[in-house]
Image (cartoon, rainbow, N blue to C red):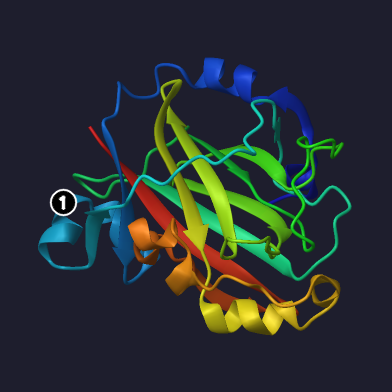
Amino acid sequence: MSDHDHEERPLTRRSTLLKAGGVLGAALGLGAWRYGDDDASAGGLAAVERGAVSCVLAPELTEGPYYVDDAAVRRNITAGKTGVPLRLRLRVLDVATCRPIRGATVDIWHCDALGVYSGVSGNRGSFLRGVQRTDASGWATFDTVYPGWYRGRAVHIHVKVHVGGDVVHTGQFFFPAAVSDAVARRAPYNRHGRPDTPNTTDAIFRNGGSRSMLALTRRGTGYVGSLAMGVRR
């Protein structure tokens, strides 16, 4: 990935979706992909038959009140916000075959380390919001920071997936409790106090969040979070 791929491009979600039209026909459902190795996905049905990959439906979870329909197409969505580095690697697949879908639009947004969202409630800017198109292998990558928390909610990230110009999935990603607890003790998160709502008591998590849990690995001082989602046609 070149340095240019990290720069914000002067496109919005609306123009992206217009260009995405025709990539696929209408989709009816969304799933999560559980995998052993990345190369296996290229095998499609053969990989499923030999047990290398399996596709399972993921829950639809509420959009929430902080969606803004004008995020820029960009990989780095930090916009000056500080926090524990987080790289998100999100994959879109056909749930029936586990084959990657190219050109799907992945749209994410989340709060900053102190629980604040951009673009709503008088908060200016567009930090921690962005859109990416999936590549030939179905991957969309974002560079961001680990989300903070706000009263009544577990740590989470919102997502929408568009295929062929239509919204085919609205969901939320969640984080392992032990990692969120460790992050909350670091600056600038510790200025906000301890989270008040763990995954187990979060009303939205209880509706299927365990199937939307990011797989996290350490990367320097931060993390890489991975999850794959597949459209069922």
Dot 1: few (<14), some (14–19), or many (≥20) neighbours within 10 Å?
some
| Residue 220 versus residue 159 in the image, above or below | below
Which image quadrant for residue 89? bottom right
Task: Choose between 74 and 46: the one closer to the eye.
Answer: 74
Which image quadrant for residue 157? bottom right
Q: Position of residue 29 (x, y in %)?
A: 27, 37
Residue 116 relative to residue 47: left or right: right
Which image quadrant for residue 93? top left
Check disc 1 and give the amino acid type.
Answer: Leu
Q: Position of residue 225 (x, y in %)?
A: 55, 66
Q: Position of residue 40 (x, y in %)?
A: 29, 62
Most distant residue in the left direction: 49
The total of numbered circles placed on residues is 1
Q: Position of residue 25 (x, y in %)?
A: 30, 21
Residue at image coords 44%, 59% = 203
| Residue 77 versus residue 186 in the image, above or below | above
Q: Is residue 220 visible?
A: no
Task: Choose between 186 and 92: the one closer to the eye.
Answer: 186
Residue 117 relative to residue 152: left or right: right
| Residue 34 versus residue 16 in the image, above or below | below
For the C terminus, the quadrant is top left
Mark 1 lies on a secondary structure that is helix
Residue at image coords 84%, 35% = 122
* Residue for badge 1: 45
Task: Choose between 123 and 24: the one closer to the eye.
Answer: 123
| Residue 19 versus residue 134 in the image, above or below | above
Q: Is residue 100 visible?
A: yes
